[in-house]
């Protein structure tokens, strides 16, 4: 007998980031993969590290100047990027670091990034009411983001770990139609799959499989700047206290850093967060949110819709990072990552099992055409990626696309899961 159990993050019926999880008994999937003609024949690989520590920099943005091809580094700092023309130079950027423009010679490319400190006189300029700065940034959203429809090509990955072991890996390339930001609505934005694959644990002990509902449509629903009801609705903003922190640089531009914390009690859990706002344009460039876990009951109600009666659910974390990138004229969606951690255990068992669910999406290209996605092609917020995904075994599955390279730990997990199929 199977069951399903759905978790999601919700503030108010009209103020939500949809992060849906379905937990159900494992079933094997085997569908044919789609194919495409080769488009990106030139590849550069490398690693990005911090100058002082030598440690890898995760989620650094990597792009080809003069083109829209882009990706981000994995947790080991590694990247590969493909283009339809020879790559002679790459640009690397990350919040708090000096942007690097590096010519490409021999591979793999070794990129060292230097933290970029804010000069004292720049820091002293930061004054005034941070709440007013946030309100001004909200009012300028129609001016600071794309005023025309765009079709984004994106790479999406979701993973589930049971304790430290991966039990589920799903990946996809999606097209996302983004309507103009000055229209102020996400309801005309749509996503469609181009290519996808899934790998599931077949261990008998992994009777629970946790899957993400909505998949790449989260780039639409989690676009906090456009879906302003999540946080930037005036009534919602009144629930928070704002505090100015030390400014940082991103893409060579000074960013105000404003921290938000709940200032009042509500019947639902609020957020702790950090907002990065471009000092020159007052555009939101990066948003970090974490659901307040001080009241486990409220956090559970925000994350959990239903569950089996005998299963206990304990929330530990729900966090979100969204990056927007300056292209010289406007800010555009670049990357998002959500992390959910929780414990599940059956009553009368001594130990709970810790689960971690991570999903991330990077915009890898902006296509010249911006035709809306037809309804029959849509990937809906209620869809589950593994119901549409193909086999994981083709080594050239991503030959035509930019992706987020799997980390060393993920590569090992993929090999282990393949052997057990």
Image (cartoon, grey):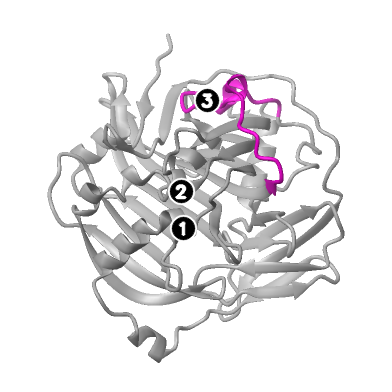
Q: Is residue 175 above or below residue 208?
A: below
Q: Which residue is mark 3?
A: 384
- Please tell me which residue is depicted at 49% across the width and 44% down the height of the picture: 164
Q: What label does residue 143 carry, if any?
A: 1
Q: Is residue 85 above or below residue 191?
A: below
Q: Residues within 10 Å of mark 1 (few under 14, many from 20)?
A: some
Labels 1 and 2 touching (C-beta < 8 A): yes
Q: Which residue is mark 2?
A: 182
Residue 172 seen in the figure: no
Q: What label does residue 319 carry, if any?
A: none
Seen from the viewer's position, the closer of residues 327 and 260 is 327
- Please tell me which residue is depicted at 60% across the width and 34% down the height of the picture: 170
User: Secondary structure under badge 3?
Assistant: loop
Q: Position of residue 329 (x, y in %)?
A: 58, 64
Q: Residues within 10 Å of mark 2 (few under 14, many from 20)?
A: some
**Residue 313 falls in image quadrant:** top left
Q: Is residue 371 magenta?
A: yes
Q: Label 3, label 2: how many angstroms apart (C-alpha)? A: 30 Å
**Mark toward the start of the polypeptide (3 vs 2):** 2
Labels 3 and 2 touching (C-beta < 8 A): no
Q: Which residues are magenta?
A: 366-391
**Mark toward the start of the polypeptide (3 vs 1):** 1
Most common secondary structure along the magenta stretch: loop
- Please tell me which residue is depicted at 58% across the width and 43% down the height of the picture: 149
């Amino acid at each position: 007998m199977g069951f399903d159990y759905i978790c999601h993050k919700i503030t108010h019926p009209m103020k939500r980031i949809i992060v849906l999880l379905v937990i159900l008994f494992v079933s094997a999937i085997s569908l044919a993969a789609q194919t495409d003609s080769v488009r990106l024949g030139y590849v550069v690989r490398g690693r990005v590290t911090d100058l002082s520590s030598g440690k890898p920099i995760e989620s650094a943005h990597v792009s080809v100047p003069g083109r829209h091809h882009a990706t981000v580094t994995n947790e080991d700092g590694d990247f590969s990027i493909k283009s339809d023309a020879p790559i002679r130079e790459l640009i690397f950027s990350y919040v708090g670091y000096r942007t690097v423009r590096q010519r490409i010679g021999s591979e793999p490319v070794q990129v060292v990034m230097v933290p970029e400190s804010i000069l004292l006189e720049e820091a002293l300029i930061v004054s005034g009411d941070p709440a007013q700065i946030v309100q001004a940034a909200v009012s300028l959203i129609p001016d600071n983001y794309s005023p025309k429809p765009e079709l984004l090509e994106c790479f999406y990955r979701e993973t589930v770990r049971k304790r430290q072991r991966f039990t589920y890996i799903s990946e996809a390339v999606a097209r996302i139609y983004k309507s103009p930001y000055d229209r102020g609505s996400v309801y005309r934005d749509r996503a469609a799959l181009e290519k996808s694959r899934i790998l599931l644990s077949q261990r008998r002990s992994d009777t629970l499989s946790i899957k993400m509902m909505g998949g790449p449509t989260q780039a639409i629903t989690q676009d906090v700047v456009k879906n302003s009801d999540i946080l930037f609705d005036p009534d919602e903003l009144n629930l928070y206290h704002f505090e100015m922190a030390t400014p940082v640089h991103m893409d060579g531009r000074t960013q105000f850093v404003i921290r938000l914390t709940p200032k009042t009690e509500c019947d639902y859990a609020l957020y702790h967060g950090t907002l990065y706002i471009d000092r020159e344009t007052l555009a939101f460039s990066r948003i970090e949110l974490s659901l307040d876990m001080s009241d486990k009951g409220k956090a559970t109600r925000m994350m959990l819709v239903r569950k089996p009666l005998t299963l206990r659910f304990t929330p530990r974390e729900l966090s979100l990072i969204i990056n927007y990138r300056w292209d010289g004229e406007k800010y555009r969606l670049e990357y998002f990552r959500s992390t959910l951690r929780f414990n599940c255990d059956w009553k009368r068992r001594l130990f709970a099992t810790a689960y971690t669910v991570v999903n991330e999406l990077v915009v890898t290209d902006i296509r010249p055409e911006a035709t809306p996605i037809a309804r029959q092609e849509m990937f809906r917020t209620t869809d589950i990626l593994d119901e549409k995904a193909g086999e994981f075994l083709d080594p050239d599955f991503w030959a035509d696309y930019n992706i987020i390279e799997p980390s060393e730990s993920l590569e090992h997990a993929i090999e282990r899961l393949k052997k057990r199929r």
